[in-house]
Amino acid sequence: MDIRSSDFTRPTLEHQGTTPVWWLVPPRAMRDATLGGHLELISEFEIRAGGEVNTHHHPTYEFYFMLSGRALMTIEDETREIGPGDLVTIPPNARHSIKPAHEHNGIRALAMAFGVKDAPVVDYSTDPESY
């Protein structure tokens, strides 16, 4: 499972040395994997205490950036706890799910997805495998 955090990344000075930047995915690091693809979506989502996103998959690279709370992230057969500032990379078609790590707390996160070249259209509102 690929989880990255700015807590473990040293900043570099960018923009003519005026801005510290923590590269979670360095420039062009995913160029070949996403060449010919497209930005599929960007959203902020919340899972309330006791809730979860059921196991699903879709033909995109998906990234979850944790804003608040602690969660249990499962990708294929691996589960890890994640928290604020963590960036999780989910490969295309990998089965994944997420839920709050504690039953009395919720979480908030950003989701960003990038369709790969020739990926089929996904109907997120009706396809039970692609939420």
Image (tube, rainbow, N blue to C red):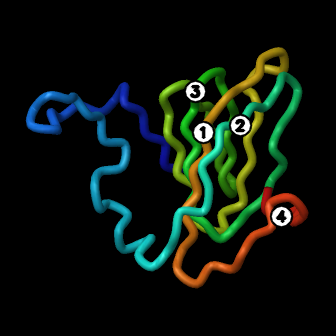
Instruction: Check disc 4 and report the residue beneath it.
Output: 129
The kind of residue tagged 1 is Leu
Which percent across, then down, holds residue 51? 87, 32
**How far separated are the C-alphas under marks 2 and 4?**
18 Å
Task: Tell me which numbered mark, 4 or 3, is placed earlier along the sequence.
Answer: 3
Task: Tell me which numbered mark, 2 or 4, is placed earlier along the sequence.
Answer: 2
Instruction: Please give the label number shown on residue 45.
Output: 2
Whether the residues at callouts 2 and 1 have beta carbons within 8 Å, the answer is: yes
114 sits to left or right of 11: right
* Quadrant placement of the C terminus: bottom right
Instruction: Please give the label number shown on residue 67.
Output: 3
Binning the other alpha carbons within 10 Å of mark 2 as few (below 14), some (14 to 19) or many (20 upward) gives: some
The kind of residue tagged 3 is Leu
**How far separated are the C-alphas under marks 1 and 4?**
20 Å
**How far separated are the C-alphas under marks 3 and 2?**
10 Å
107 sits to left or right of 16: right
45 sits to left or right of 28: right
Compared to 11, does 117 lie above or below?
A: below
The kind of residue tagged 4 is Glu
Task: Tell me which numbered mark, 2 or 1, is placed earlier along the sequence.
Answer: 2
The kind of residue tagged 2 is Phe
**How far separated are the C-alphas under marks 2 and 1?**
6 Å
| In this rendering, the label closer to the viewer, 1 or 4 | 1
Indicate the quadrant where residue 123 lies: bottom right
**How far separated are the C-alphas under marks 4 and 3?**
25 Å
Binning the other alpha carbons within 10 Å of mark 1 as few (below 14), some (14 to 19) or many (20 upward) gives: some
Determine the secondary structure under disc 1.
strand
Identify which residue is drawn at 15% across, 33% down: 13
Instruction: Check disc 1 and report the residue beneath it.
Output: 110
| In this rendering, the label closer to the viewer, 4 or 3 | 3
